[in-house]
Amino acid sequence: MSDSPTEAPNPPENGAGRGPIPANPWRPPILLATWFGSGLLPGMPGTWGSAAALPFAWVIQYHWGPMALALAATIAFFVGIWAADAYTAETGVTDPGPVVIDEVAGLWLTLALAAALDPAHYIAGFVFFRFADILKPWPVGWADREIKGGLGVMVDDILAGLYAALLLYLTTEVLGVL
């Protein structure tokens, strides 16, 4: 690093080893992108972000129903595009691990489409969503590779959320499990 006063210092590394974190993680787009810092936890940021989304989903669905949760997922999607763009612009990383608002939107979509307000359904939805997000079946993997920017960060998790909703529906309604 140069001693030049005009050169910005490199952002600090994320403890999870997922690249740099912005200098000020308390700014609204960064706080939302990392879902209140859950994406900065070590190890598995996507899993941490998904887990942190569950209590919010429960409260929304409990008080206002699955349509409100679907609306919240839609809002999280659009806010996520903005927040992910801000995070990537600040760090220079195209799909940074600490950005987990995409997991929030995808998991909320899964739960809104197929989960009853039941802990077993929420746990199954969480597992199915993480499964689809990690394995990235077509077109999830295609979207992850080909769509760039904040939209690209968000779209693959929405597609994974649709896969997970289908798996949850088949499990609970067709097979009668849970």
Image (cartoon, rainbow, N blue to C red):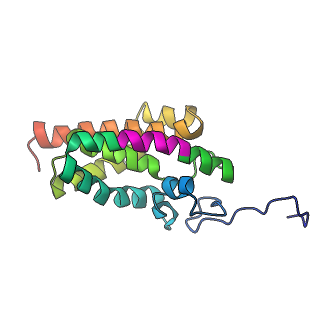
The rendered magenta stretch, by its main secondary structure, is classed as helix
Q: Is residue 80 magenta?
A: yes
Relative horizontal placement of residue 143, taking residue 137 as reference (left or right)? right
Position of 66 relative to 87 (above/below):
above
Q: Quadrant of residue 74?
A: top left
Of 123 and 37, which appears nearest the observer? 37
Q: How many marks?
A: 0
Of 41 and 70, which appears nearest the observer? 70
Give residue 132's position: percent from left, percent from top. 36, 43
Magenta span of residues: 73-82
Give residue 111's position: percent from left, percent from top. 26, 45
Relative horizontal placement of residue 120, taking residue 100 as reference (left or right)? left
- Name the quadrant of the N terminus: bottom right
Position of 142 relative to 134 (above/below):
above
Give residue 43's position: percent from left, percent from top. 49, 65
Q: Is residue 31 magenta?
A: no
Q: Residue at x 60, y 51 (%)?
A: 87
Q: Is residue 164 visible?
A: no
Position of 137 relative to 97 (above/below):
above
Q: Residue at x 35, y 42 (%)?
A: 73
Q: Residue at x 39, y 45 (%)?
A: 105
Q: Quadrant of residue 160?
A: top left
Q: Residue at x 49, y 67 (%)?
A: 41
Q: Is residue 8 visible?
A: yes
Of 148 and 145, which appears nearest the observer? 148
Give residue 2's position: percent from left, percent from top. 89, 64
